[in-house]
Image: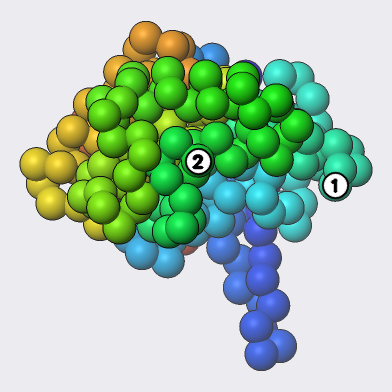
Amino acid sequence: MIVLENLSKTFIKDGNRIEVLRGIDLDIAPGQSLAILGVSGAGKSTLIHILGTLDHPTSGTLSIHGQNVFSWSERDISGFRNRHIGFIFQFNNLLPEFSALENTMLPALISGVPKKEASKRAHGLLEEVGLAQRATHKPGELSGGEQQRVAIARALIMKPDILLADEPTGNLDTETGKKIEDVLISLNRERHITLIVVTHNQHLAERMSCRIGLSDGKIYDVQ
């Protein structure tokens, strides 16, 4: 499903070249769950942003479903991302003035899905993540774990086949983080969504079907 070939990313800062990713080669199969590990600054977030087409590599290719996505126009890339990729971040970025239901619906409404259909999808997803009774509550009325479950529901509203999560349990206590882990693992197994997670959480990483590390811009195997 996802193939990276000789992918590199270089930033220029104060006239200096910073090579964040160096010739990454990686194959990710449909329905696989993959943990990306590494110390802070190793390039994990840069890699997942490129996988999500939010950032472009300096060189190399990213192919998804056999298509070299960065050969497309920005409009086509954006449309592909909206249809196929869901995102969950450490900071859930929920809009405080909107309810859980409205936050979940938002990507679908922006994409032109009729409000009735978007609401139906959102209700179903909130039920799936255990928040059916909290649909009308605003983020400030929800716990951290509940907010992150809303963010997961929002990431699924466009029915993506790829789910990217950047430190999804990073701001949560151990017990709440375990519940979020359970939701993510369940989505991968029951929906066969390809799940890619950047994490420092060793317990979460061990529950994934595959683990890789990132150091000095290169990938290494994690046992």
The N terminus - image quarter: top right
Using the image, tell me which numbered label, if any, was put on residue 109.
Answer: none
Q: Kindly identify the amino acid type of the residue bearing the numbered disc 1.
A: Glu
State the SS at label 1: helix
> x, y (%) of residue 71?
87, 39
**Looking at the picture, does residue 219 appear above or below residue 179?**
below
Return the residue at label 1: 74
- Residue density around tag 1, few if under 14, some if 14–19, many if 20 or more, within 10 Å: few
> x, y (%) of residue 170?
27, 54
> x, y (%) of residue 23?
63, 48
Q: Which residue is drawn at 9% across and 41% down?
A: 175
Residue 111 visible in image: yes
Number of marks in the rendered image: 2
Looking at the image, which is closer to me, 212 or 193?
Answer: 193
Q: Which residue is drawn at 30% across and 58% down?
A: 140
Q: Residue furthest left?
A: 175
Residue 167 visible in image: no
> x, y (%) of residue 210?
36, 26
Return the residue at label 2: 102
Q: Kindly identify the amino acid type of the residue bearing the numbered disc 2.
A: Glu
Q: Which residue is drawn at 57% across and 21% down?
A: 159
Q: Distance between the residues labelled 2 and 1?
A: 27 Å
In the image, taking residue 55 as reference, residue 67 lies left or right, namely right
Looking at the image, which is closer to me, 176 or 150?
Answer: 150
Q: Which residue is drawn at 23% across and 44% down?
A: 145
